[in-house]
Image (cartoon, helix red, strand yellow):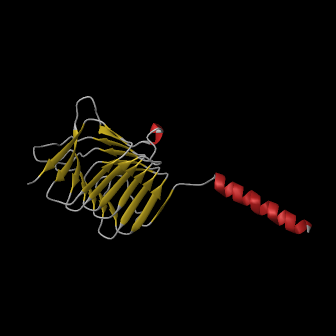
């Protein structure tokens, strides 16, 4: 009986030790080289990390879940697979001409801060989000409770005193935009089409 108690005590100690020292990690397309493109080709979950990438491509058939992640993106973002940004900080610099966050499938932004910049803007480019045909953009907090503002998503320009950013949507497409309990600073919803 004494051995069983020692075994139980040892197991509890080991469980506490491994729980306290939980680490960041990634499952799926986890080949990340700082400053290079990140190609997401499978079901991918990245958590508790800080990363810097050029282009971010979530390819057809893949999914991406960023959870408690700080990510700096200097190039283009192409979302062809369902993507979630949860409790994260996204700094989108858009340093390349024609860069934006193109949503072709579904992007859910949950309790996340997104800061947008466009240093290489020219007429015709979208600063911010471009919604392709049949895409979905969801921006919300984590608990659907407007009386708890600490968990809201905040999307703004890098210099929010003068820089507007866009959600560019073609009315001819069957797109979905759902914004709940979040703060969008200097946003312009640009609906175009017939």
Q: Residue at position x 86%, y 64% from top?
A: 5
Side of 189 relative to 142 (left or right): left
Which is more toward the observer, 37 or 89?
89
Residue that extends furthest to the left in the rendered view of this protein: 194
Location of the N terminus by quadrant is bottom right
Side of 131 relative to 50 (left or right): left
Residue 76 to residue 3: above or below: above
Residue 109: percent from left, percent from top: 37, 50
Residue 34: percent from left, percent from top: 37, 53
Residue that extends furthest to the right in the rendered view of this protein: 1
Tally of numbered discs: 0
Q: Residue at position x 47%, y 48% from top?
A: 143
Residue 74: percent from left, percent from top: 28, 48
Residue 169: percent from left, percent from top: 18, 52
- Residue 63 picture quarter: bottom left
Q: Residue at position x 49%, y 51% from top?
A: 48
Location of the C terminus by quadrant is bottom left
Which is more toward the observer, 151 or 12?
151
Side of 123 relative to 130 (left or right): left
Which is more toward the observer, 65 or 31?
65
Q: Residue at position x 36%, y 54% from top?
A: 108
Side of 16 relative to 32 (left or right): right
């Amino acid at each position: 009986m004494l051995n069983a108690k020692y075994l139980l005590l040892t197991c509890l100690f080991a469980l506490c030790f491994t729980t306290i020292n939980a680490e960041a990690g990634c499952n799926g397309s986890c080949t990340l080289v700082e400053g290079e493109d990140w190609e997401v080709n499978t079901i991918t979950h990245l958590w508790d990390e800080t990363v810097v990438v050029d282009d971010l491509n979530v390819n057809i058939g893949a999914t991406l879940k960023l959870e408690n992640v700080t990510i700096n993106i200097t190039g283009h973002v192409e979302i062809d697979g369902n993507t979630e940004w949860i409790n994260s900080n996204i700094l989108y610099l858009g340093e390349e001409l024609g860069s934006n966050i193109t949503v072709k499938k579904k992007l859910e932004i949950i309790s996340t801060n997104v800061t947008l910049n466009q240093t290489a803007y020219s007429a015709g480019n979208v600063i911010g989000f471009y919604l392709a045909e049949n895409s979905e953009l969801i921006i919300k907090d984590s608990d659907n409770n407007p009386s708890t503002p600490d968990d809201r998503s905040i999307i703004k320009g890098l210099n929010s005193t003068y820089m507007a950013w866009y959600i560019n949507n073609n009315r001819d497409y069957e797109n979905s935009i759902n914004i709940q309990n979040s703060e969008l600073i200097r946003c312009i919803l640009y609906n175009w089409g017939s």
